[in-house]
Image (cartoon, rainbow, N blue to C red):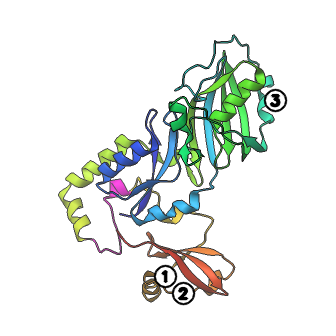
Amino acid sequence: MNGAIIVDKPAGWTSHDVVNRMRRILQQRSVGHLGTLDPLATGVLPLVTGSLTRLAQFYISCEKTYEGVIRFGFSTNTYDADGEPSGEVCPVTLALQSLQEVAAKFLGVIEQVPPPFSAKKIAGVPAYKLARKQKEVILQPVSVEIKEFVITAVEADRAHFRARVASGTYMRSIAHEMGLRLGCGAHLEALRRTAVAEFDITHAHSLEKIEDQARNCHSDPSAAEELRSQRPKEPQLSAGLESLFIHPRQLLPQFPSVTADEPTAARIRSGRPINLPELSRARQVKVFAGQRELLAIATRVAGTLFHPKIVFPAE
C-alpha cells in the first residue's frame, strides 16, 4: 500500500524501532520515516509506505515545532536526561522573565554546535559512536534557524518551553547552551514534537491504535477479500485502517493538485510529459488519478509542459 501515517512516538523508542514495528503491523517492508526523533522524545513521527517513501526528499528541510522541559542545575554528556551528569548539581533559582530574555537571544539564524552524541559525522564516523568510546568529539558549528523559542512556565529548577525551528536544529544543544550562559548547567529533560511540516499532533496515532485497526483488517474475511480483489491502480484499505492514514491530497500542500483522465494517467505511468495549461505558473504539481491515488510529482520543463519527476507505482 502507498500512504502516509503519523505515529505518536513513545518515549524510549528510536525512530528505527517504530519503523520496524510498523513493518510488522502493516505486513509491509517498504516503510520509512520523514525525520528522526531522539529516543527521549515523543510525538509526531511521519511515516510513508510503499512507493511514497520517495516523498522523503521533499521533507528534508521542513519546519518542526516542539514543546519540552529544560532542567537547570547540571549538564549531561548527551545534553539530555538519558546521559550521565557532567558535574555536580548546582542549586538554582529561576525567574520566568529572566529566562524569557535569555531565550529571546536564540531567535533567528544562529551558529549551533551539535551534541557529541549525535549522528553528525567526523571523518565518516557518526559522532555518537566516538562519544560512546569516550573518544574526543569536536564538531563544527552549523547555521540553524530558531523561528520561535518561548519559555512558557517555570517550576523549581525546570523551565517549560515551546519552539519552532528549521530542520537540523538540536533542542538538546539549545538547552545545553542556556545552561552555559546562566553558568549553572542545563539539559533537555523532556521533548515532544507537536508538528512536522503539514503534520501536527492531531494527526498522530499510537502504535497500539494502529495495530488494533490492522489486526481487525487482517482478521476480517470481507476486508481481506476486498484487499485481494482490489484493482492494482486503486489501492484501498479497510475503512478503519484507512481513516488513520493522511489523505493523499493533504500531502505537500505547497504543490497544486490536478486530476488526470485515463489517457493522461497512462502517459504519466510510462514517464512521458503531459500538458497542463491551467497550471502554467506552477513549478511542480501533484498529479492524481481519482481522489486518492497519487500518480506523480511533475515538474514544469517549458511553458505548460510538465514531466513526471517521480512516478509512484501502485503497491
The CA distance from mark 3 to mark 1 is 53 Å
Q: Secondary structure at mark 2?
A: strand
The quadrant in which residue 254 appears is bottom right
Residue 298 versus residue 262 in the image, above or below: above
Answer few, some or many: residues within 10 Å of disc 3's Cα (few below 14, many 20 plus, some between 14 and 19). Answer: few
Mark 1–mark 2 CB contact (< 8 Å): yes
Q: Is residue 244 magenta?
A: no
Residue 101 versus residue 264 in the image, above or below: above
Q: Position of residue 238 (x, y in %)?
A: 30, 59
The label shown at residue 274 is 2
Q: Position of residue 84 (x, y in %)?
A: 55, 21
Label 3 amino acid?
A: Glu
The CA distance from mark 2 to mark 3 is 54 Å
Label 1 amino acid?
A: Ala
In percent of the image, x 71 and y 13: which residue is there? 92
In percent of the image, x 57 and y 33: which residue is there? 191
